[in-house]
Image (tube, rainbow, N blue to C red):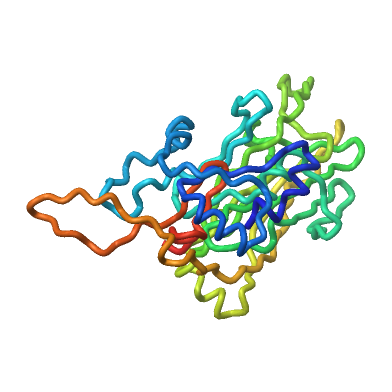
Amino acid sequence: MELATHQEALAAQGLGVCSITYDTREVLADFAARRGITFPMLSDPDLHIIRRFGVFNETVAPETYQYGVPHPGIFFVDAGGVVREKYFEEQYYHRMALPTILNGRSPEVPPDARLAWEGENVRIWTWALPSQARPGLRLGLFIHVAPASGVHVYAPGGPDYLRAVTPEVAPSPYYIVHAPPYPDPEAMAEEILGETLRVYRKPFTIRVDIALAPRKDLEPIYGAGSRFTVAGVLRWQACTDVLCWPPAETPVAWDLGLDPPDLERVPEHLRRQPKVHHSPLTQPGTCRVPEGGSLCRAHPHRGTPRAGEG
């Protein structure tokens, strides 16, 4: 489980770990014993806390097996109980990767980063976090750009005749690409042109997120050794105060591996039953409510389809 895997990294940033789920205490005890989970997992089968956080999924009908599953997400809450950050996805099977969030808070170039470009005016590295993923995970593709001393590159939003730093990730049926946020640029007054330009003089990092497809859509990758490469291009233009180099571009790539799907579930006698509301036109069904969903971090492993297994 991702929260347990990254407990030390979270602690290094002064963060504790807990989860809130609509599962019963018995389900959580079974899961914790099987996975060696030691952090607090709070049971909220009556959905009181989940509703107070505003993440109860109102679109799910009470008679369906999904009833009670909250919108899965991550909250960063301070010691006073104030939510400082939150991360949610549009698709229920997508989950934001914790390493992506943590590295995005204080990005550093890891020792195994790939040197994608080394020129007289700029150097570029790439890496992915995490590089080992699972279906449905939203992960970060990082690009670190280091201008040489006295060199600047251009941020988006400037004049068309200057090429801004622009990453482009190749489309694929295996993932969707999210538009990247950019770090805040500096303002540089250009006296000859009479303009104020948006530039980067110091090293900076751009993160492009991709959200992997569900498990069934990734079967060709599993059949090919569970590894694949995400390809892209980075474009930019570098200048000094007195000269500009021609616009440049370089291919960039990120190698990723896929973890095997986790299909283990709690014993059947612990699984929740649906609250079925019968009408003259309906008969009792045989579906069971899955024991899954959570607040702070999704827990589909207990009964709901895992991320990407829907």
Residue 191 visible here: yes
- Locate residue 238, reporting x and y percent: 79, 42
Residue 171 visible here: no
Q: Is residue 160 left or right of residue 93?
A: right
Q: Nearer the viewer, residue 153 or 303?
A: 303
Q: Is residue 184 left or right of residue 275?
A: right
Q: Nearer the viewer, residue 98 or 206?
A: 98
For the point 59% across and 46% down, the residue is 41
- Dividing the picture into quadrants, the one containing residue 37 is bottom right
- Dividing the picture into quadrants, the one containing residue 90 is top left
> How many numbered badges does the structure rendering display?
0
Q: Quadrant of the C terminus?
A: bottom left
Q: Is residue 91 above or below residue 74?
A: below
Q: Nearer the viewer, residue 286 or 8?
A: 286
Q: Nearer the viewer, residue 19 or 72?
A: 19
Q: Quadrant of the N terminus?
A: bottom right
Q: Is residue 55 above or below residue 9?
A: above
- Locate residue 111, reporting x and y percent: 86, 57
- Locate residue 266, reporting x and y percent: 49, 64
Question: Residue reaching furthest left?
Answer: 280
- Locate residue 299, reporting x and y percent: 53, 53
